[in-house]
Amino acid sequence: MIFIHYTGGMYSRHVLPLLQDALADTPVVLLNGARQTGKSTLIQSLSATAQRRYFTLDDATTLAAAASDPDGFISGINDPVSLDEVQRAPGLFLAIKAAVDRDRSPGRFLLTGSANVLLLPHVADSLAGRMEIVTLWPLSNAEVAGSPTLNLADGLFDEPVYSLPISPCDRGELIVKLLAGGYPESLTRAVSRRRQAWFDNYLQAIMQRDVRDLAQIEQLVEFPKLLRLLATRSAGLLNFAELSRTSGLAQTTLKRYFALLETLFLVYRLPAWERHLGKRMVKSPKLYLPDSGLLAHLLGQTEAHLGAVAGLPGALVETWVFSELIKHLAFTTKQLTLWHYRTQSGVEVDFVLENRMGKLTGVEVKASQSVSSKDFNGLRYLKETEPHAFQRGILLYSGREVVPFGADMFAIPMSVFWAKV
């Protein structure tokens, strides 16, 4: 196990073996993810051990050279190289394509981007067939706990986690995790006001640099307001008409701004699962903010407030589970995909994990410390309507132990995500 040093701790990043495998057989590897997820630290550690040159486009001189003459900049680099924040000079992608067409040696270019290149027009296409993309989300709770690389999405899908020793889900510990999120820097801020200051500075830096880089938008007043509005809708259906009315933004403008926030990994749309076109299913995606700490900050949630109330906000807890699932899906060995499930009659399952053979595992989230049989109704409906595809139903709750609710239905404490297994 290789540990990477971040401010405040040493963590083993679970996508690292995937990244190393890609470098061994692919000319260009892109480590994609939001700012401050640890991309730079990770590739600098790889560069140091592999004698790989390192440049960051956050450096003004390097950016000027790469932007003014991309071909000259790339042709002047003969050794394997790491290029950090490559989205700041989009012209580099065509220059890298030309260099790779001349020499397809594996591992020549290790790139990082704080914008999702799959959503940037013409960028990903220029390196089709030459580039593998690995996504680095903020730290998972398994990484923070120092757990081995057991993939919990795979485990929930295919049984291994059920028999593991899982400690009770302590409410106070869960609250701390909900508020901290997974950005390495935010995890170092134990005091609430210091964490709030970090999130404020983080959002300000993104608005002033990345939004202007990608969209050349000078008037940025709407963006923080829109992000706060979207935070109140996290774990809900994405409805642009309602958002347009509430925000006062025209739908065309709203969708353009939303796409930009999505490109910067600040929001995520989870598609609806649908296999049979004749069924009356809700087709709208669900909206999530990918980090519960950022969501809690935007909603003004504090440890004192959450500790004083009887329950926990369902949307915040569901968003936290979502963020944990996508972190493990980034290195799934079963090629799982994630969906939500909802019928027009109101039956829903928070998450559906699906493999390439079409097998399904449903995952429900309850913020409460106890559950009853009726909490499995959505999962049972999914089983009844998809009997050949359904494998099992999981209900994640803030309780004490794994409880079977039938041969293929289980209530599992959310502490499974930080269990040292």
Image: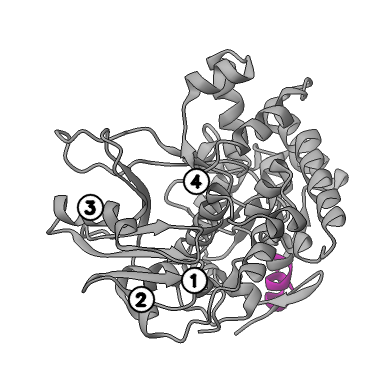
Secondary structure of residue under mark 4: loop
Give the left or right position of residue 145, taking residue 159 as reference: right
Residue depth check, mark 3 versus mark 1: number of the one nearer the observer: 1
In contact (CB < 8 Å): disc 2 and disc 1: yes
Amino acid at pointer 2: Val
Residue drawn 76% across the image and 40% down it = 206
* Residue 46 lies in the magenta stretch: yes
Amino acid at pointer 3: Leu
Tell me the CA gap for discs 2 and 1: 10 Å
Residue drawn 14% across the image and 33% down it = 278
Residue depth check, mark 4 versus mark 1: number of the one nearer the observer: 1
Q: State the residue position of label 2.
A: 403
Amino acid at pointer 1: Gly
**Label whose residue precedes the other's in the sequence (3 or 4):** 4
Residue drawn 77% across the image and 48% down it = 57
Q: State the residue position of label 4.
A: 127
Amino acid at pointer 4: Leu
Question: How far across and how far down the image is residue 215, in percent?
Answer: 68, 26
Give the left or right position of residue 353, taking residue 189 as reference: left
Question: How far across and how far down the image is residue 387, in percent?
Answer: 13, 57
Q: Which residues are magenta?
A: 43-52
- Any part of residue 364 in sight: yes
What is the magenta segment's predominant secondary structure?
Answer: helix
Q: State the residue position of label 1.
A: 399
**Label whose residue precedes the other's in the sequence (4 or 1):** 4
Q: State the residue position of label 3.
A: 382
